[in-house]
Image (cartoon, rainbow, N blue to C red):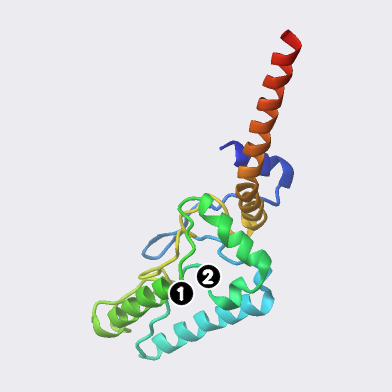
């Protein structure tokens, strides 16, 4: 896409970093990793999420049923009160398959996944269900909103998404100015030929 090429050129490696990595071989097959951390959310947020994962792994290893799933990017009030995040969220769907969900949608789907985890004995949430690697607990039942399949790292599309959003806002004005310019040129050419 021309817009992506422009962002790659302007960003000089900061914008639109590839989200593809070679799989890591391990017990139970190959493992695929993505960088789904947004630095803009701060180090405390990233650490809190990691600590949740560590606690879930420990609890499952001790025989507890653990439902710990990945939720999608959601346009909650706490996120969109930051204008920069709100602008980025408006432009992110340009980067398919990335999608920003309404809180009601995220809540409904995550509740259904939780219900499944608690009531299906074959769910990975059940400690009796065998998994080859403890991190597989987070790879099943996740509602990632496209982060896992997006061509670019989530942290590298923020600025490009903001530019895309404002470009979309400016589009009617651009076409209006273009139409006025064409009309003025037509009137000028008509008056100079008479």
Above-or-below relation of 182 to 160: above
Q: Residue at x 57, y 59 (%)?
A: 90
Query: Residue at the location (60% across, 71% down)?
Result: 80
**Along the line of sight, which residue is nearer the eye, 158 or 62?**
158
Front residue of 26/127: it is 127
What whole-number distance in Å separates the C-alpha atoms at marks 1 and 2? 6 Å
17 in relation to 103, above or below:
above
* Circles 1 and 2 in contact, beta carbons < 8 Å: yes
Q: For residue 110, what is the image quadrant?
A: bottom left
Q: Quadrant of the C terminus?
A: top right
Left or right side of 186 for 126: left
Count the marks.
2
Ranked by sequence position, the earlier of labels 1 and 2 is 2
User: What residue is rendered at 55% in x and 64% in y?
Assistant: 36
Residue 23: tell me if it is visible.
Answer: yes
Q: Position of residue 146 (x, y in %)?
A: 46, 58
Q: Is residue 16 visible?
A: no
In which quadrant is the N terminus drawn?
A: top right
- In the rendered image, residue 48, in percent from the top left (x then y), is placed at 59, 82
Question: Foreground residue, 79 or 12?
Answer: 79
- Which residue of the protein is positioned furthest toward the top in this rendering? 194
Judge whether 27 appears above or below 7 on screen: below
Q: Position of residue 143 (x, y in %)?
A: 40, 68
Q: Look at mark 2 in the image and give the residue it sits on.
A: 75
**Secondary structure at numbered mark 1:** helix
Q: In the shown orientation, is residue 56 left or right of residue 16?
A: left
Residue to which mark 1 is pinned: 103
């Amino acid at each position: 896409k021309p817009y992506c090429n422009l962002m790659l050129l302007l960003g000089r490696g900061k914008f639109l970093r590839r989200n593809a990595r070679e799989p890591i071989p391990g017990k139970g097959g190959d493992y695929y990793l993505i960088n789904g951390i947004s630095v803009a959310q701060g180090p405390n947020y990233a650490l809190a999420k990691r600590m949740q994962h560590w606690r879930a792994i420990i609890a499952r290893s001790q025989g507890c049923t653990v439902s710990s799933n990945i939720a999608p990017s959601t346009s909650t009030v706490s996120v969109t009160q930051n204008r920069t995040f709100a602008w980025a969220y408006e432009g992110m769907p340009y980067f398919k398959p990335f999608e920003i969900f309404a809180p009601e949608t995220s809540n409904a789907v995550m509740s259904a996944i939780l219900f499944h985890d608690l009531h299906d004995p074959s769910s990975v949430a059940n400690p009796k269900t065998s998994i080859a690697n403890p991190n597989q607990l987070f790879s099943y039942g996740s509602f990632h909103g496209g982060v896992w399949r997006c061509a670019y790292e989530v942290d590298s599309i923020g600025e490009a998404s903001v530019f895309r959003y404002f470009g979309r806002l400016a589009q009617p004005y651009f076409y209006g100015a273009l139409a006025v310019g064409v009309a003025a040129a037509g009137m000028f050419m008509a008056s100079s030929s008479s």
